Amino acid sequence: MANPSLAEYIAQSQRGLYQSVFGPGFMKKAGAGIGTPFQSSNTGIFTATYGRKVWQALNNQTRFFNAVPRVVWGNTAGWRIRSDRGANRSRPVTEVGSIPSVNISAIQTVSSLPRIVSTTFGASVKSVFTAQLEGGIGDVLALENENAQLDHIKELNEELLALSAVRASATTSATTVQVGATNALINHFKIGDEVSRYDLSGTDHDAAAGLTVGGADGVVHAAGLMTLDAALDGYTAGDIIYAYSRAGFSSLDDVVAEDNWAACGGVARSRVFDLAVGGTTASTGRVAGNWNAAATVLHNSGVGRDLSLNLIDTCIQKIRENGGEPKLILMGHDQYFRLERLLNSQQRYMGQEEYQVGVGSERTFPGTRTGLVLATYMGIPILPDADVPKGCSATSTALGSNVYVLDTDYLEMAIAQPTQYVENRDYFAANALVVRGLLYTMGEMRCKNFWVQAKVTDLNA
């Protein structure tokens, strides 16, 4: 017998469906027959069926991490920075005058050791089996591995863009501090980070070393509340909490900082790479204009103001005056659209050719050479990132995102160990029938020249 044609096959299929001995309505998805569909009590065969693909409802972009150059760590625990030319060793000499006295350069040392960031996942033996059955999501271990990889890189990006200082919003106990009603601001401080405080009432900084975020038990933040391991005095409303040291990767906001910059209506002394802060001499404190402070920190004492071209131009100017050349402007999407509106009045309709600029392994949004859609400003690529930190106001609320103008020739992601994957199926060690996975990366962001980095903070959204 010859194989039936496609038309005959379809006709036979339909005939069997609607002309069976059970009646035309028995196999339908509504009414009587095998269960009523789409009800939780339904025990029939026509329940809702979902695909195996799991789609993301999360922002997994890591644009800044992708844009920063990555290098091998190398055989080093830090580097040296030449911070002056030596006194009077270069000067005019008359015909029979004495030559300049011998002097030496000032050489500063910066300590930088790798940090470890890890991400875990796991699945029970039973879930691994049942996920493969009809209606399951498939290989649950592969799914969780894929998701963990996304989460791991996202964590690195968030750490690199963590906010440096926030303001306490309420009186708290000796070991807890409240910053707003949500975790929007307090999440910039990870478990294991150390923070210090500027006491607004006493107008002084804590003399002791930083306090560990999360305490001894690693307590996570809840509704804007942060737990500390100990405190000499209770943090009160108005106190400024700032990064003393990071457990994970150092933050760009920590790098582009200085002593006593006006943060959140108070002042902060954010440390990075174990640089001393608050010293009485230029060699120890991160004094504005010093070698270990940023080129420019343009703030407004915790009061929001609109972004202006003058603010960005000042950052570019200061970087160039200090011998650098801006290679990247980093901002949140809110400031990206503000900047576009600022430039709209300068449009010149000479052409609409779209172009993009590569920044590391990222590319800018498509732009035109008329400024209608941004790709560059003054030839500097503009990269918006959703993780760019929002400033903290003098009332402990989030402002608009910061703007960073960077010379990325002196910024790098130094990798001591590339991301490693470890899987464990030792049920006796886990004391459970589970399969566990671990991803970890060892490295650190390094800045070889602080003078050629700048930021604008205290901006409106």
Image (spheres, rainbow, N blue to C red):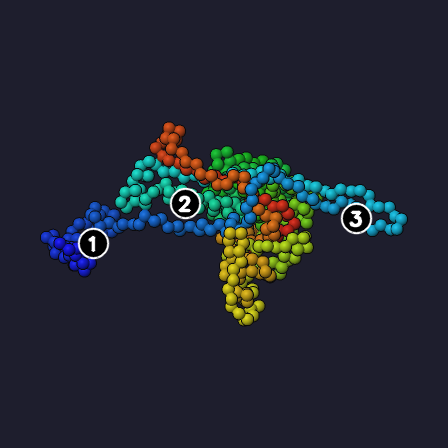
Distance, label 2 to label 1, CA atoms, is 35 Å
Give coordinates of residue 99: x percent, y percent.
84, 46
Give coordinates of residue 210: x percent, y percent.
58, 38
Few, some or many C-alpha atoms within 10 Å of disc 2 (few <14, some 14-19, many ≥20)? some
**Furthest residue toward right:** 96
| Apparent side of residue 205 relative to residue 63 in the rendered image (left or right) | right
Residue where numbered disc 3 is placed: 90
Which of the 4 image quarters holds residue 428? top left
Residue situated in front as seen by the camera: 271 or 240: 271
Q: Amino acid at mark 1?
A: Lys
Check disc 1 and report its element: helix, strand or loop.
loop
The residue shown at (51%, 68%) is 352
Check disc 2 and report its element: helix, strand or loop.
helix
**Marking on residue 436:** none
Query: Nearer the N terminus, badge 1 or badge 3?
Result: 1
Q: Amino acid at mark 2?
A: Asn
Residue where numbered disc 1 is placed: 29
Mark closer to the observer (2, 1)? 2
Distance, label 2 to label 3, CA atoms, is 59 Å
The residue shown at (80%, 46%) is 88
Residue 189 can be seen in this image: yes
Check disc 3 and report its element: helix, strand or loop.
loop
Residue where numbered disc 2 is placed: 147
Query: Nearer the N terminus, badge 2 or badge 3?
Result: 3
Is mark 2 in CB contact (under 8 Å) with mark 3?
A: no
Is mark 2 in CB contact (under 8 Å) with mark 1?
A: no
